[in-house]
Amino acid sequence: MIKDTKIAVLIDGDNIPSKYISEMMEEIAKYGTPTIKRIYGDWTKPHLSKWKNVLLENAITPIQQYGYTTGKNATDSAMIIDAMDILYSEKVNGFCLVSSDSDFTKLATRLREAAMVVYGMGEKKTPNPFIVACDKFIYLEILANDEDNDKGVKSGKKKKENLYNITPKVIKLLQNSVDDAADEDGWAFLGDVGSLILKKQPNFDSRNFGFSKLTPLFKSLGENFEIEQRDQANARFKLIYVKNK
């Protein structure tokens, strides 16, 4: 993750519920600075009225796009055109495309071809082609889960279900990634493993399985993996290494 990455955040207002906005902006800030923030939609339509209250709070610029033709999504076209204009302006080095629509697959691919880092955000219903076209894809449901889980701990309420279960297929992905990143003794630095997993599966996130970080996810699979903490000189934090059993 590059801390000084300047990110253009482009939101498909017709496709994303406004209830995710706070958690979404907090998540984006983990990957860089959102210097351009725009949301697209036909603001004359009643279903977008909920967005109006949160736009000023988050300094997001609404872009009006009328639906000129029935059955055609003018919002998608406006977003794509703006993205290309921003790309050529050279004002950012990353994009966050917020939509659950596969229509942005080609846009994500084109931006990555131009050496932009592309983060995708959308609901679990997002088609796989758009997901794999991004460097990293985050499901909005897990951001809402994070907040609800914190409240649940304080209030004693039951946490929401995880988006996915840890299946043999998931374990195989982890094992193969450890093998691919391992040294001659079979040990792999967990940071390298995490980066490799994302390259193979951009929507992989430990939070999908109910874990805040990758380390506790691996620790929960103690029958499959060994975990080792190693001291590093002049540093407060220990390095985490993992090995297949």
Image: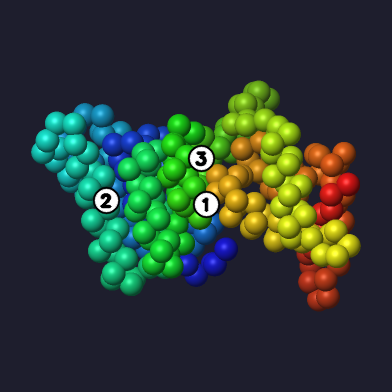
Q: Disc 3 residue type?
A: Tyr
Distance Cα–Cα, label 3 vs label 1: 10 Å
Q: Which residue is outermost to the bottom?
A: 234
Distance Cα–Cα, label 1 vs label 2: 19 Å
Name the residue carrying label 2: 79
Is 232 located above or below residue 151 in the figure?
below
Q: Is residue 232 visible?
A: yes
Q: Disc 2 residue type?
A: Met
**Disc 2 crowd, CA 10 A, few/some/many (<14, 14-19, 20+):** many
Q: Secondary structure at mark 1?
A: strand
Q: Kindly check if marks 1 and 2 are in contact, taking CB atoms under 8 A apart as contact.
A: no
Q: Position of residue 209 (x, y in %)?
A: 66, 36
Q: Position of residue 126 (x, y in %)?
A: 44, 36
Residue at 84% across, 46% down: 225
**Disc 3 crowd, CA 10 A, few/some/many (<14, 14-19, 20+):** many
Name the residue carrying label 3: 139
Q: Secondary structure at mark 2?
A: helix
**Disc 1 crowd, CA 10 A, few/some/many (<14, 14-19, 20+):** many
Residue at 27% across, 53% down: 80
